[in-house]
Image (cartoon, coloured by chain):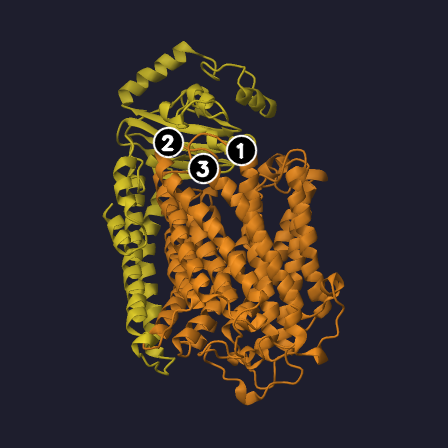
Chain colours: A yellow, B orange
């Protein structure tokens, strides 16, 4: 958060922001800055983000510093006389080459991180994520578990126009689902993203990436979640009227707990859980079923 | 405008009243129409932005339905890009290019008239969709299939509006190119051209090269929707991602179409109020050309998350961050121009300095976005929204404001109200930062773009952003008042208007004659190389 202070000092933002930062940090890792996340990749991404941000801040201080110095020192009202020079090849070469070197310095770690990100080999399990207007379907390819996951009812009631329900009174407003995606920690999980109707994007900031879910195509990504916990995200590609209302909740539990969850899930319900506790009267549900053909069991 | 021609009866043989404007082939009349049209669209697109900020003022849905919200997001973008910034630059080119190169008028005056008059019809088509069943287009200005194919009755209106807008812009671009290459005064060699003309040459080539690609893409959408083709449908053997590649092959040059003339404007204004020649004229020209070239090989950085092969992601990351080099050269040149100069801070200079600082902030976030692995986090969040509003509002729009204040006295023959102009600058600059700076934080904290409602943890920054938005919106009414006041009269402007002004347009009277240079200017007045 200290970079913020620099920006404040630089006169780029007003004072209440710094105070706001404290009150704004939620119980999870979302806050003012990018999350560090809980995967090896997300931490590398965070570090890269901070490196590039600091480079920008330093360049900004130098360039804007020079500008403000010029604006105060070379005023006509202070009797400044303009000099006539308008070229200097040495200086121009210097400020072409130095940025180039800085960029190479950024590109090297970025390349390393990207190569790691794209290496989906040796995954220990696979989850297929399918985007629908407007919910997600999760298929555990290895264990055969499959269910849909959509906006939790209390958020869905509150978000209707004229509902009269204060969003502040709803826990995890718009970031809660009826059925969570349960995954084991410390396991290399391969995510296959695709979609059934339009393009969506599956994004949980704590995992460090988002990936488009494209009808007819399957994208591969991976994550190793290092800390147990509940991680929330949202659809990140405009996908129609309820694009803002298809959250993602990932619950990471220990591999042992995960095993028993799988066993319980297989025993308890052989059929996909479509929508636990949803009620048919909601306009949202009605319009959804108009447009989406759910696969028949 | 009648005052404009009063002293130059010998030049003006044109019909009066509405017929003058319908049939005009005069570059100044057409330029004025472009600029007035652009200003009107600025307020229509701005009103949509106000609706967006109103809905986002508080969590929960208070004012509009999600579908209508998406329509506002889509229409706001289409209007601001195709209806405000592009026509405004063509308007400035019309007014200024003939005066800057010592020509009497544009090379293709009838094409000029036609290019403009397409615009009101195109935007009628687009705006009428607000009243059609199913509402206005709501799939985003990027028109990604398959979502855009779910558009209702508005769909063909959207496609044909885009076609018309493209035709209009290509016409305008061809006209500028033909004018600059054929009608320069003797002695006006290419490397003596003012940078505004140079940036417009390069913009013209970008327009001519990229808009037909957009036309192709939207035509394929049209046939996918109505004629049974499957260009972009996986079920029929097509590829929805291919649309994104084609769209952004147009779309990235497009963002430089919006910003390159701004570089030209700022390169005219800063030396004027520094009373010192522009630093590194030649490197400015090369930098613009380099940016334009690179703009054709970076398009996929708009779509890093679609799942490209690693080699593709690396290539587009490298080319994207490379743009920082020529862009940096331009900024450094502007700062060097200020060094050891004698500055004054009239309104055009304030907006130009505001441009340099705030556009550079947009450039910083652009560099961050270009780093592929981190873009996986930034992509489609408010961080991106903050980025492109910094480069487009405090970039392109600021330079349009600067240019308006800079050349308005030349056009009208009257000085604008300097005190009000400064009010406009400071109100705009404070409010626009309150509006867009917090959106960086929203994006980093995880708020996606294009959502009508959000989780309560984003509430504080959204309130701040909305308040900034309302103040910024209202401040622009002051701009209109200042322009109207200036057109109606005021303190007489001298021919040179600004003490440090350099260039052929300042050798003409204020206001200039109806036909700019009926005889070529004296070659010794072409000072070249300084701006």
Q: Is label 2 in contact with label 1 (beta carbons under 8 Å)?
A: no
Q: Indicate the chain on which mark 3 is placed.
A: B
Query: Same chain for marks 3 and 1?
Result: yes
Horizontally, residue B486 falls left or right of residue B465, namely right
**Contact? badges 3 and 1 (CB < 8 Å):** no
A277 lies above or below B234: above
Task: Between residue A157 and residue A34, name the one nearer to us.
Answer: A157
Check disc 1 and report the residue beneath it: B64
Residue found at the very far left of the displayed protein: A2
Q: Is residue B206 above or below residue B369?
A: below
Mark nearer the N terminus (2 vs 1): 1
Badge 2: residue crowd in 10 Å (few <14, some 14–19, many ≥20): many
- Give the residue displayed 56% in from the left and 24% down from the top: A288
For mark 2, what is the residue?
Answer: B456
Left or right: residue A34 compared with residue B220 = left
| B428 or A34, nearer to the observer | B428
């Amino acid at each position: 958060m200290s970079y913020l202070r620099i920006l404040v000092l630089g006169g780029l933002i007003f004072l209440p922001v710094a105070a706001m930062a404290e009150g704004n940090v939620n119980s999870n890792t979302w806050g003012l800055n990018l999350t560090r996340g809980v995967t090896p990749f997300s931490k590398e991404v965070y570090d890269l983000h901070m490196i590039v941000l600091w480079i920008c801040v330093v360049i900004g201080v130098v360039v804007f510093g020079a500008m403000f110095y010029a604006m105060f020192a070379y005023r006509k009202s202070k009797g400044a006389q303009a000099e006539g020079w308008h070229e200097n090849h040495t200086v121009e070469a210097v400020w072409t080459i130095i940025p180039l070197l800085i960029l190479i310095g950024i590109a090297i770690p970025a390349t390393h991180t990207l190569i790691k990100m794209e290496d989906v080999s040796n995954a220990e399990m696979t989850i297929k994520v399918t985007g629908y207007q407007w919910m997600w379907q999760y298929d555990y390819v290895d264990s055969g578990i499959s269910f849909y996951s959509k906006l939790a009812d209390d958020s869905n009631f509150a978000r209707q126009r004229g509902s009269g329900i204060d969003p502040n009174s709803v826990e995890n407003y718009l970031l809660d689902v009826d059925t969570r995606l349960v995954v084991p920690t410390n396991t290399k999980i391969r995510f296959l993203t695709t979609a059934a109707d339009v393009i969506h994007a599956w994004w949980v900031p704590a995992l460090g990436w988002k990936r488009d879910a494209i009808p007819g195509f399957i994208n591969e990504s991976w994550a190793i979640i290092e800390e147990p916990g509940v991680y929330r995200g949202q659809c990140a590609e405009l996908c129609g009227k309820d694009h803002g209302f298809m959250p993602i909740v990932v619950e990471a539990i220990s591999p042992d707990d995960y095993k028993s969850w799988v066993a319980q899930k297989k025993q308890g319900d052989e059929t996909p859980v479509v929508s636990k506790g949803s009620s048919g009267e909601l306009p949202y549900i009605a319009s959804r079923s108009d447009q989406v053909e759910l696969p028949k069991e | 405008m009648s005052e404009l021609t009063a002293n130059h009866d010998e030049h003006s043989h044109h019909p009066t009243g509405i017929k003058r404007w319908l049939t005009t082939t005069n570059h100044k009349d057409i330029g004025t129409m472009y600029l007035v049209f652009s200003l009107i669209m600025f307020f229509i697109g701005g009103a949509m932005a106000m609706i967006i900020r109103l809905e986002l003022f508080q969590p929960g849905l208070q004012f509009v339905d999600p579908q209508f919200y998406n329509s506002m997001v889509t229409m706001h973008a289409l209007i601001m890009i195709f209806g405000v910034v592009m026509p405004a630059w063509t308007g400035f080119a019309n007014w200024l290019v003939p005066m800057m190169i010592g020509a009497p008028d544009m090379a293709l005056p009838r094409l000029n008239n036609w290019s403009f008059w397409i615009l009101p019809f195109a935007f009628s088509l687009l705006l009428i969709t607000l009243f059609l069943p199913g509402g206005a287009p709501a799939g985003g200005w990027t028109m990604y299939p398959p979502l855009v194919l779910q558009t209702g009755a508005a769909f063909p209106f959207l496609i044909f509006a885009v076609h018309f807008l493209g035709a209009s812009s290509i016409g305008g671009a061809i006209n500028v190119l033909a004018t600059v290459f054929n009608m320069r005064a003797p002695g006006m060699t290419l490397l003596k051209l003012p940078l505004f003309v140079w940036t417009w040459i390069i913009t013209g080539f970008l327009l001519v090269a990229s808009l037909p690609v957009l036309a192709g893409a939207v035509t394929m959408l049209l046939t996918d929707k109505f004629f049974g083709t499957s260009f972009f449908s996986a079920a029929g053997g097509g590829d929805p991602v291919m649309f994104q590649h084609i769209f952004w092959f147009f779309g990235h040059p497009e963002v430089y179409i919006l910003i390159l003339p701004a570089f030209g404007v700022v390169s005219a204004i800063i030396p004027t109020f520094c009373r010192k020649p522009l630093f590194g004229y030649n490197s400015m020209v090369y930098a613009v050309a380099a940016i334009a070239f690179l703009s054709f090989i970076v398009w996929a950085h708009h779509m890093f998350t679609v799942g490209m092969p690693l080699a593709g992601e690396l290539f587009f990351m490298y080319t994207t961050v490379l743009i920082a080099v020529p862009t940096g050269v331009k900024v450094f040149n502007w700062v060097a121009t200020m060094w050891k100069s004698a500055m004054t801070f009239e309104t055009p200079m304030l907006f130009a300095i505001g441009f340099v600082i705030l556009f550079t902030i947009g450039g910083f976030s652009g560099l961050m976005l270009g780093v592929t692995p981190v873009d996986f986090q930034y992509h489609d969040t408010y961080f991106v929204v903050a980025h492109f509003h910094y480069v487009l509002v405090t970039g392109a729009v600021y330079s349009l404001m600067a240019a308006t204040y800079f050349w308005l006295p030349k056009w009208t023959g009257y000085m604008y109200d300097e005190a009000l102009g400064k009010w406009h600058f400071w109100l705009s600059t404070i409010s626009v930062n309150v509006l867009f700076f917090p959106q960086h934080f929203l994006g980093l904290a995880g708020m996606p773009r294009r959502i009508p409602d959000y989780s309560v943890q984003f509430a504080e920054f959204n309130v701040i952003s909305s308040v900034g938005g309302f103040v910024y919106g209202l401040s622009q009414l002051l701009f209109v008042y200042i322009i109207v006041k200036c057109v109606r009269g005021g303190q007489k402007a001298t021919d040179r208007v600004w003490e440090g002004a350099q260039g052929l347009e300042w050798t003409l009277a204020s206001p200039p004659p109806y036909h700019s240079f009926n005889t070529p200017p004296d070659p010794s007045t072409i000072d070249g190389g300084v701006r």
